[in-house]
Image (cartoon, rainbow, N blue to C red):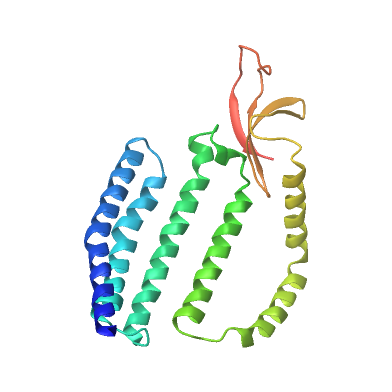
Amino acid sequence: MEASFLKQEIFLWGLGLVLGMPILILVLGEWSERLARRGNPLAQGLRQIRHVVLPVLVVLLVLRHLVGVTDAAAWLQSLETLLWLTVAYAGLTLLRNTSTFSDLYPTAWVSGVPGLFFVLVRTVMIFWVLAYILAGVWGIELGRYATSLGFAGMAVAFALQEPLSNLVSGFLLLADRPFQVGDWCQIDGRWVLVQQTGWRTTRFESYEDGYRGGAKWGSGKSGYH
């Protein structure tokens, strides 16, 4: 009975890999090509998933579920580590390219998302992947290092009081949102158009000789304030 169940499980995994993976590869390939033709930066991340992540995933699934290699094998753990590193690499690429949407498409929803949000998401992703690789793949107990990390974090917080204060001020500015992308502001007697807001800087475009909403414009300048 157990042997029959194992054969059925192997058959299902084999069928899924033979039918599912080619379809997934074709879908990702077509999707990335369409995005590339439109100049969408997300095409790069989809290509990395198709050409880097999926091959490693297929090899890992074949060895684990079809060949029957146990998870205790060191080289299988190394392969799984490589898989998660490729996933992190492709994910970071997608996040980085998503954050550039505000420059390519000023009216896109990303233009209203603070740049600090993407920085925090990337940081959380990196720490999560590293923690899973150490604890979930290699079985390293991370709890005993928590106290040391806590003391190290306190030391870093005391050493970086001024930068952290500026960081908190940036958070408060983003929460208050005194201006948004597309708003006009007057700075030193000049009207400027807000193009991008962040926790540290605000990107604007200045028109020295023009009038807000008018038909006549002077020289345009971009900068940070």
Q: Nearer the viewer, residue 164 or 45?
A: 45
Q: Residue at x 50, y 70 (%)?
A: 129
Q: Is residue 160 or residue 219 the one in the foreground? A: 160
Residue at image x 62%, y 37%? Answer: 223
Q: Which of the two residues, 22 or 194, is positioned nearer the viewer here?
A: 22
Quarter occupied by the N terminus? bottom left
Q: x, y (%) of residue 4?
A: 24, 80
Q: Is residue 225 above or below residue 46?
A: above
7 vs 153, nearest the viewer: 7
Q: Kindly give the residue lying farthest to the top in the view shown.
A: 215
* Residue at figure coordinates x 70%, y 75% from the top left: 153
171 in relation to 108, above or below:
below
In the picture, which quadrant includes the C terminus? top right
Rendered location of residue 63, percent (x, y): 27, 77
Q: Quadrant of residue 19?
A: bottom left
Percent of width and height locating residue 214: 65, 13
- Taking 149 as reference, is 172 left or right? right
Q: How many badges with numbers are in the image?
A: 0
- Is 137 placed left or right of 12 in the picture? right
* Farthest-out residue, front: 1
